[in-house]
Image (cartoon, rainbow, N blue to C red):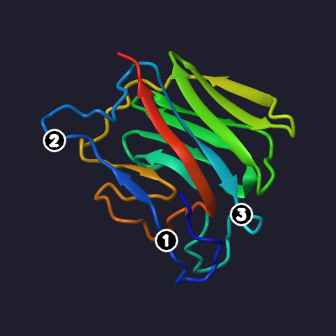
């Protein structure tokens, strides 16, 4: 999926894919207290950078996100300033894991996993002979229950959505490409 190129202006294009669970009372996007992982393959544009310019709407590089920073719960994978970061927040606290800088115009596979109190971020790339190299970082801390305030909170790919599902004013727009986004919640 191709997302808009970097544009620090207040009128920059914004795009995000909105994913909602099926109606019927079960929130398929809620990992609760269980083990879960989410990730995607990411290719950043050479001009992709988080902008802190006044009025900029293109100020981040979100890959996958559900929930907002100050919300009840959040899981998020981003590459702001070309640094992969995974954030898991539940009713018992938040854990953030960052990795080393990544290069633009190179495909990376990013995977964030919460298993108990351990949050792990894996960043994989491939050399010219297609051999993978994975860098794994982790942090420990209690996150607790991930149940959001409402089961209508969408999962977004490529940018930030408000709980209502509309694109946020500061969309944290990914500038580049995303392939194979996924969420896996263990029973």
Q: Residue 11, relative to residue 109: is it above or below?
A: below
Report the residue at 39% width, 30% height from top.
91
Q: Where residue 30 sits in the image (x, y, percent)?
A: 33, 32
Q: Secondary structure at mark 2?
A: loop
Residues at circles 3 and 1 in contact by the CB criterion of under 8 Å: no
Q: Residue at x 33, y 64 (%)?
A: 166
Q: Can you identify the residue that label 1 sits on?
A: 14
Q: Residue at x 73, y 34 (%)?
A: 124
Crowd around label 1: few <14 · some 14–19 · many ≥20 (10 Å): many
The CA span between labels 3 and 1 is 15 Å
Sequence-earlier tag: 3 or 1: 1
Q: Earlier in the sequence, mark 1 or mark 2?
A: 1
Compared across the picture, whether 162 is left or right of 37 comes to: left
Left or right placement of residue 7 versus residue 82 in this view:
left
Distance of mark 1 from mark 2, alpha carbons?
27 Å
Give the camera-side residue of 130 and 110. Answer: 130
Q: Which quarter of the picture shows residue 113?
A: top right
Q: Residues within 10 Å of mark 2 (few under 14, many from 20)?
A: few
- Name the mark nearer the viewer: 3 or 1: 3
Residue occupied by mark 3: 45
Q: Nearer the viewer, residue 157 or 144?
A: 157
Residue 161 shows in this picture: yes
Q: Which residue is mark 2?
A: 23
Residue 35 locus on image (x, y percent):
45, 19
Q: Residue furthest right?
A: 128
Residue 71, given in percent of the width and then of the height, sits at: 39, 47
Q: Which SS class for mark 1?
A: loop
Question: In the image shown, does 117 or 180 lie closer to the viewer?
Answer: 180
Give the secondary structure at mark 3: loop
Q: Is residue 172 above or below residue 99?
A: below
Quadrant (top left, top right, bottom left, bottom right) of the C terminus: top left
Quarter of the figure with residue 149: top left
């Amino acid at each position: 999926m191709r997302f808009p190129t970097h544009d620090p202006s207040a009128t920059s294009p914004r795009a995000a894919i909105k994913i909602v669970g099926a109606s019927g009372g079960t929130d398929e996007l809620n990992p609760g207290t269980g083990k879960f992982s989410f990730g995607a393959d990411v290719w950043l544009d050479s001009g992709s950078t988080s902008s802190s310019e006044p009025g900029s709407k293109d100020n981040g590089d979100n890959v996958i996100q559900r929930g907002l920073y100050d919300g009840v719960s959040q899981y998020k994978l981003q590459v702001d300033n070309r640094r992969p970061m995974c954030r898991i927040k539940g009713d018992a606290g938040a854990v953030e894991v960052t990795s080393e800088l990544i290069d633009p115009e190179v495909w990376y596979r990013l995977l964030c996993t919460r298993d108990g109190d351990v949050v792990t971020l894996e960043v994989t790339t491939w050399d010219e002979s297609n051999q993978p190299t994975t860098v794994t970082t982790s942090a420990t801390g209690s996150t607790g229950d991930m149940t959001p305030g409402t089961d209508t909170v969408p999962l977004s790919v490529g940018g930030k959505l408000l709980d209502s599902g509309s694109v946020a004013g500061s969309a944290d727009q990914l500038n580049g490409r995303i392939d194979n986004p996924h969420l896996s919640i263990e029973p």
